[in-house]
Amino acid sequence: MITVNSTSETLFNFPCDYSIKIFGKNCEKFQNTICTIVERHTHKLNPNKITKKHSSKGNYVSFSIRIIANSRIQLDSINQDLKNCNLVSYVL
């Protein structure tokens, strides 16, 4: 199945490998919280598919989480739930 997002003209061929970047304040519960949110919409995350990067001063952290996306609806739901989380500053 091929889905086209006309606003960004991005082409997805589902299922596909997809990376979600999540930025937020560097706090102890951030990683667990965002992984729980993503896992609501996917299967259990593979720790090898999660990368963590700290900001230069260490106040912020970003995570890249690679998943197998099954639909645009799934991606939209993950993004919306992450944006609704008060620990998350930004989602790409």
Image: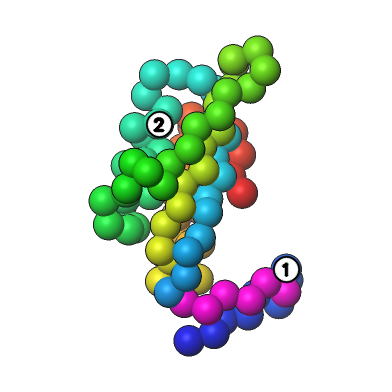
Q: Main secondary structure of the magenta part?
A: strand
Residue type highlighted by circle 2? Gln
- The single residue placed furthest to the front in the displayed view is 48
Q: What residue is rendered at 42% in x and 28% in y?
A: 30
Residue 8 lies in quadrant: bottom right
Q: Which residue is mark 2?
A: 31
Give the x, y percent position of residue 78: 45, 55
Name the residue type under label 1: Ser
Tag 2 secondary structure: helix
Q: Which residue shows up at 47% across the image and 64% down it?
A: 17
Choose top left, top right, bottom left or bottom right for residue 68. Answer: bottom left
- Pick out the residue farthest to the left: 44
Indicate whether residue 22 is drawn in magenta. Answer: no
CB-based contact (under 8 Å), mark 2 and mark 1: no
Question: 37 and 59: which one is in front?
Answer: 59
As measured in the structure, the alpha-carbon distance from the residue carrying label 2 to the one carrying label 1 is: 28 Å
Residue at 52% across, 54% down: 19
Residue 61 image point, x, y percent: 55, 26
Q: Is residue 28 left or right of residue 58?
A: left
Residue 8 — which label? 1
Tell me where residue 76 appears, x and y as whole percent: 50, 62
Q: How many marks?
A: 2
Magenta stretch in the rendered image: 9-14
Q: Vertical placement of 73 versus 53: above or below?
A: below
